[in-house]
């Protein structure tokens, strides 16, 4: 808990916060801070202004989105500070850890637990959609527990790629993380808030088996799978999962965005609103697969989707979106024959503030 020396000038000049470094990213540093008067803990995203040159619109968009939203399952923006060299976003501090970490640490985990998690995500995203906001980067590492308590709520974070609908332009920019983006995004089609619903379906899939629905050592085959919505409920991993859960996921991971469930429809599905989620302990199988497929060093890596599109063009996969939805039982799609998942070599850099418009 060393004092963040690089921000010492700010502490001295304001005397408001005591700061402790949490982690650094490509464009910002996140520090934990305690307000000296109230002793309230917050997280501060410290963004060097020199890193924002030419990207001001993106950060302005993120701030505009965060200022509009207030939901119990969304990390809140509490204040903004600005100096000559830095922009500081004062954020609500969430201290419960990442989603997969907590599941792996549990001794007991059921479909019902997964259903409750997804219900909270759906509530929050449904709220965003009602406000005309599309998140565009929903993935497990953006889902954090509010506190270490066993019954802690889940929180959605990171609105750097979010977009407000109705701003006069059609969303068509490829952005997000390939494993969670909808087929229409990879196919460079105009898209809507339905892309968030697809991502929720992918997350729900992983929560029930511990491995991703799309995986292949070969990049071209991986992207073909996503473009075709080519996934399976593989045995034996899905043998003890209810048909209701599979039906729920199938409605969210529907290739055609016009036929895909909305958040409101998903919230009314029996697996969420009813009593069809099973209470059988699936922790051993799910946690084993999560440790195998989502080691921290792997799932923390974000990919530049624009670079993925360039890569797909080289592989001449741009027309694959029109293909039929084929469910194959090939060895590469069978988790029994999968090696631990690894970051795809898609010739890309960490996602930057300018990758989305």
Image: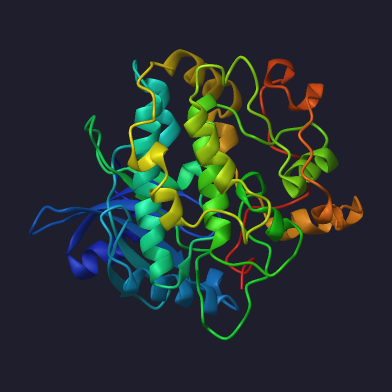
Q: Is residue 111 above or below residue 51?
A: above
Residue 141 rendering spot, x and y as whole percentages: 48, 43
State the scheme by which the image is colored.
Answer: rainbow
Between residues 284 and 264, which one lies in front from this camera angle?
264
| Residue 349 seen from this side | yes
Between residues 343 and 323, which one lies in front from this camera angle?
323
| Residue 300 seen from this side | no
- The residue located at (65%, 53%) in the rendering is 182
Q: Quadrant of residue 327?
A: top right
Residue 237 rendering spot, x and y as whole percentages: 58, 18
Q: Is residue 9 above or below residue 238?
A: below
Q: Is residue 58 above or below residue 117?
A: below
Q: Quadrant of residue 281?
A: top left
Extreme residue in the left direction: 37
Q: Quadrant of the C terminus?
A: bottom right
Q: Quadrant of the N terminus?
A: top left
Residue 169 rendering spot, x and y as whole percentages: 61, 82
- The residue located at (65%, 44%) in the rendering is 179
Apparent side of residue 318 relative to residue 210 in the rendered image (left or right): right
Apparent side of residue 188 relative to residue 299 in the rendered image (left or right): right
Extreme residue in the bottom direction: 168
- The residue located at (63%, 27%) in the rendering is 233
- The residue located at (84%, 52%) in the rendering is 320
Q: Is residue 114 above or below residue 15?
A: above
Between residues 263 and 90, which one lies in front from this camera angle?
263
């Amino acid at each position: 808990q060393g004092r963040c020396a690089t921000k010492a000038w700010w502490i001295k000049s304001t005397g408001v916060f005591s700061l402790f470094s949490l982690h650094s990213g490509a464009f910002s540093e996140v520090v934990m801070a305690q307000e000296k008067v109230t002793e309230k803990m917050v997280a501060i995203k410290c963004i060097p202004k020199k890193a924002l040159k030419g990207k001001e619109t993106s950060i302005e968009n993120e701030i505009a989105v965060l200022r509009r939203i207030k939901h119990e399952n969304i990390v809140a923006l509490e204040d903004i500070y600005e100096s000559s060299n830095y922009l500081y976003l004062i954020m609500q501090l969430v201290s419960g850890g990442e989603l997969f970490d907590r599941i792996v640490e549990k001794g007991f985990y059921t479909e019902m637990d997964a259903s409750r998690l997804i219900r909270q995500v759906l509530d929050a995203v449904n709220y965003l959609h009602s406000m005309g906001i599309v998140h565009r980067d929903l993935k497990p590492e953006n889902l954090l527990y509010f506190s270490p308590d066993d019954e802690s709520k889940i929180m959605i974070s990171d609105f750097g790629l979010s977009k407000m609908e109705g701003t006069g332009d059609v969303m068509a920019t490829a952005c997000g993380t390939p494993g969670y983006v909808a087929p229409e995004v990879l196919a460079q089609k105009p898209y809507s808030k339905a892309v968030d619903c697809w991502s929720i379906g992918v997350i729900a899939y992983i929560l029930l088996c511990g491995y991703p629905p799309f995986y292949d050592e070969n990049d071209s085959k991986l992207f073909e799978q996503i473009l075709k919505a080519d996934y399976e409920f593989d045995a034996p991993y899905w043998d003890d999962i209810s048909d209701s859960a599979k039906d729920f996921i199938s409605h969210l991971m529907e290739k055609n965005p016009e036929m895909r469930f909305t958040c409101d429809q998903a919230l009314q599905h029996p697996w969420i609103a009813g009593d069809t989620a099973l209470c059988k302990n699936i922790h051993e199988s799910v946690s084993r697969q999560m440790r195998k497929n989502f080691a921290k060093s792997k799932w923390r890596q974000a990919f530049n989707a624009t670079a993925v599109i360039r890569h797909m063009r080289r592989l001449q996969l741009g027309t694959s979106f029109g293909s039929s939805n084929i469910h194959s039982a090939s060895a590469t799609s069978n988790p029994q024959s999968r090696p631990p998942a690894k970051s795809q070599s898609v010739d890309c850099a960490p996602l930057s503030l300018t990758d989305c418009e």
